[in-house]
Amino acid sequence: MTDTPISYRRRGVADFTTAMLATSIFALTTVMSVAAPAPAAETSAAGGLEEIIVTATKRTQNLMEVPIAVSAFSEAALQNSGIRDIRNLVALSPSLNFQTPGGDSDSSVRIRGMGTTSTNVGLESAVGVVIDGVPRARTGVALSELGDIERIEVLRGPQGTLFGRNTSAGLINVITKNPNMKEFEGYVEGTYGNYDYYRLNGAVSGPLVEDVLGVRIEGVVQKRNGFLHEVNTDTDTMGLNRSFLRGKLQYQPNENLRIKLSADYTNRNEDCCTAVFSLVGANAIKGQTIAATHGVQSYGSTHPFDRLAARSPGRVNQEDVKDWGVGLEVNWDAGVGEVVSVTSYRDWKANRGQDFDHSGVDLGYIPKDGIFQQFKVFSQELRFQGKSGPLDWLVGAWYSHEDITDQRAFLMGVDMPLMFNTAKPAVLAAFRPGDGGYGFSNQKGEDYAAFTHNTYAITEALKFTVGARITRNKKKVDLTANTINPACDTAVALNDPVGIGSFCASFWDSRLNPAGGKDSRAETALTGTVNLSYEFSPEANSYISYSRGYKSGGYNLDRAGFSTPATPNAADLSFGKETVDAYEVGFKSQFFDNTVRFNAAVFYQAFKGFQSIQYTGVSFIVFGLPKAITKGAEVELTWAPVKGLTLTGATTYADAYYTSDPGNRAFAGKPMEMSPKWTLVGSATYDFPIPGTSLKGLAYADIRWVSTYMTASFGDINRQQDAFALVNGRLALSNESDSWRVELWARNLFNQDYYRRVIPATFQAGSYSAFLGDPRTYGITVRTNF
């Protein structure tokens, strides 16, 4: 063991040269006809590309005619590529990036480098997730099992005109499968893989009354051992244990009326949220000495990708999530236009415990179920839309009510006095294990909005689109913070800087005893879009657009969020709205007898009041930073050279950064976190008959390469992730009727090491903890259709 910090940040495929080697392997695989699916496109009988239908503008349209940057992924594309979770879409969509450092409730998503990074439920996402027409309250709430998916659309840039607030960076639109109204069908699918992974899923669907009343029921159960091994308990952590059930009922008495009722339930109970040391400094070595007095290790290894974690005896890293919702969609053709009503209610709640110093030295912890979060959301959207001559018009209204509860306890472990034994003796004597801080908050919010989105055909080729949305957002909060911490009281009374710096950390500052109160805020925002598109031919069109997006202000629902703990109040936790002005020019084309599809866009998006959370050394404060920018270009190419073979490639260049405005504080001029400038993806699919048999095969591969990026905003080299590539592959065999199918698959085929996020080790200055990306996984999937 050495006193010199050791970093293994660059281990694995970490530079462009090695990435190009992986690309060469992929290219060779392609030449050998091992290929992957085109997004939302299947090869036609003539070897060309089939039409892609999307609902990105809340109308049914050909993707090539939609004058915005959107990518779509069909059921077949998702099945062939093995994507069962929207986080895996990053393999096919270069502008998309997910961050899941611990549990799903910590997740955040970015499009074109912009998004929201925070585990604080008071901050809403800049990238919306809409499932069957209903927005999910937070990104983490949207990451429950999705079941069978008909299509996923990724809309880039602000989408607030049609989809409302909190889509200032973009939107993921998920459409799940509907009941079969004509005949009964179903499937059963089983998967087994390494890490003792298994997944069993299936569905049954069909008419109760043919063409009038149909039903669909589907379910999923999956479990997996953890990717990390915890050395002090000799158990695995970061595993899966979840189940999902959804039912849909569709009633269509005539061609003018369709009513869909859906309900779903998800349960997750997982050992999660564990980090390993990525850099071991002097304080961590001191922690190892302290932990040894208890007969345990403070950290598993100085090499993070040994995947050895350590936590203190008696502490837990657990997350238990229960999520259910119901929805009702009514579509009525009234003759002069279509009336659409979408009503929903969702209840999501999670309990969590965590050893948040991520080590075997017992410094700080959240007890089992020490965090409780709940979202209860009701929403109603009503639209009236249709066509009148050259005008395609849409008007609508929206209402939602959101009730959020957040309760958390941060407690001190038994080893705090040993780690900070330079505090004054009276401070150390006042310490009691299990002392700490508690926070209780409830936030209620309401949204009212009216919107319109209209396209006028000036000529057959030239179209002008204008849309606007006015939103009224109201929130009120009731927050209380309590603290039991005589060590902090003594440190403050004696003016002991070491004692204040350790025993009065923001988690358990005794000046917050009690603190909080009630407050309310309201804001009105006008958003909209203006778009001019021109069709050069049925195979080529272009557009230029301006859009304004909006993300609502709110409250920092964290007891560590008070900027002045000595005089805390609820209004101190308030932060303002975020807006974005976005400019985009795009081009879409198909040529060579519809065997090649080429789309491109350039963009510039300027955010004002950008919401970012910053640790000041005392508190976690949400700042509305004056300005943040993302600018760049996107290119997508799909080619079907022969029957059964489809090749795709896509590149995104996104320069996302905080500007140098004085108000940007420590962020000024730094790149946006989790935002590589360059991302390249490639895929290929070869679907072929096997000569002399009644069988057919499918071969698949894809690659995603990202350039170097920061996992945090402060430019700390120890929190940097170097460039790397991930490769996935799949081979499938089925009969001609597709009544059965067997697949061999692998994700992260070359076992690339990479970080999801790197953070300073809690109370162990000079050391860093890291949440790791998934290692190589592989397995077999067997499916039977009936």
Image (cartoon, rainbow, N blue to C red):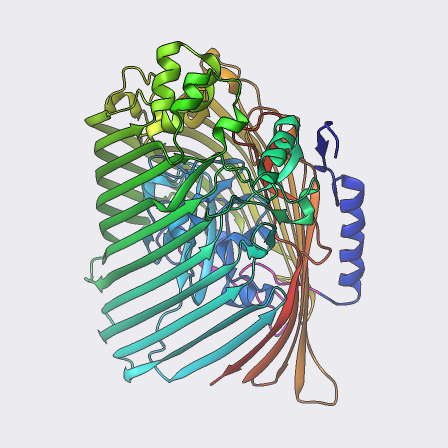
Query: Tag count in the figure?
Result: 0
Q: Main secondary structure of the magenta part?
A: loop
User: In which image quadrant can residue 693 be found?
Assistant: bottom right
Q: Position of residue 742 (x, y in %)?
A: 62, 78
The residue closer to the viewer here, 40 or 431, is 431
The residue closer to the viewer here, 293 or 41, is 293
**Residue at x 43%, y 53% (from the top left corner):** 143
Q: Is residue 433 left or right of residue 593?
A: left
The residue closer to the viewer here, 84 or 48, is 84
Q: Position of residue 418 (x, y in %)?
A: 53, 28
Can residue 29 be seen? yes
**Residue at x 46%, y 21% (from the top left corner):** 627
Q: Is residue 195 left or right of residue 124?
A: right
**Residue 313, relative to residue 693: is it above or below?**
above
User: In which image quadrant can residue 678 be found?
Assistant: top right
Q: Is residue 646 left or right of residue 222?
A: right
The residue closer to the viewer here, 226 or 285, is 285
**Residue at x 56%, y 73% (from the top left corner):** 191
36 inside magenta stretch: yes
Q: Which residues are magenta?
A: 35-55
**Residue 158, relative to residue 753: is it above or below?**
above
Q: Position of residue 16 (x, y in %)?
A: 76, 40
Looking at the rendering, in which quadrant would you find the N terminus? top right
